Image (cartoon, grey):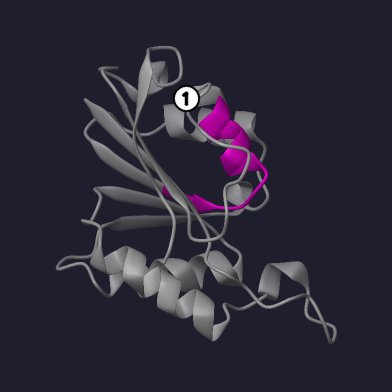
Amino acid sequence: MKTLTLMRHAKAALAEGGIEDHQRPLTPQGHAAATAVGKSSTAPDLVLCSTALRTRQTLEDIAQCWPSRPAILFEPACYLATPGTLLRRIQAVDDAVLNLWVIGHNPGLHELALRLCPGRIGDRFPTACRAVIQSEAESWALFGQEVSVLAALLTSP
């Protein structure tokens, strides 16, 4: 069984004062939400993370709560990625990985969750939201082609 967690970054500051979107940091509320996610989750085998500051900070806050640090790949292609781009990247993951997290952005994450679990995901995918999706697919290359089950849809407190 393969387990995929799609995680939207925690709450970030607005792009004001000349801050580029890619460099937007988490707010104090965002850091607290990401830490709460870390405390309520277990470390995956691999994390694919957008290179945006807000996703990297979300990952750091979560990972500090895990007893061991998983393998992490910072992926420029995950920054504001489309659902198709995200799914192709997921399908390229090594099959030795059983538990994969993708930390990124809307609307791509939300649209991918809707595609993988039609009728199970609502019309919102707020910051610090995570969808845990399981599949009996033996290979990540088949993920999205086999039946997927929404195991959990969690939002921050």
**Outermost residue toward the left?**
67
The residue wearing badge 1 is 117
Q: Amino acid at mark 1?
A: Cys
Q: 50 and 106: which one is in front?
A: 106
> Quadrant where the N terminus lies?
top left
Residue, x 35% and y 74% (percent of image)?
35
Task: Give residue 58's position: percent from left, percent from top.
Answer: 46, 69
The location of residue 26, given as percent across then percent down, is 57, 77
Q: Residue at x 21, y 67 (%)?
A: 66
Question: Which quadrant of the view contains residue 139?
Answer: top left
Q: Quadrant of residue 143?
A: top left
Relative to 102, is 29 above or below?
Answer: below
Residue 60 visible to the viewer:
no
Q: Position of residue 114 (x, y in %)?
A: 56, 29
Count the marks: how many? Answer: 1
2 to the left or right of 91: left
State the residue at coordinates (38%, 12%).
146
Callout 1: SS:
loop
Q: Quadrant of residue 133?
A: top left
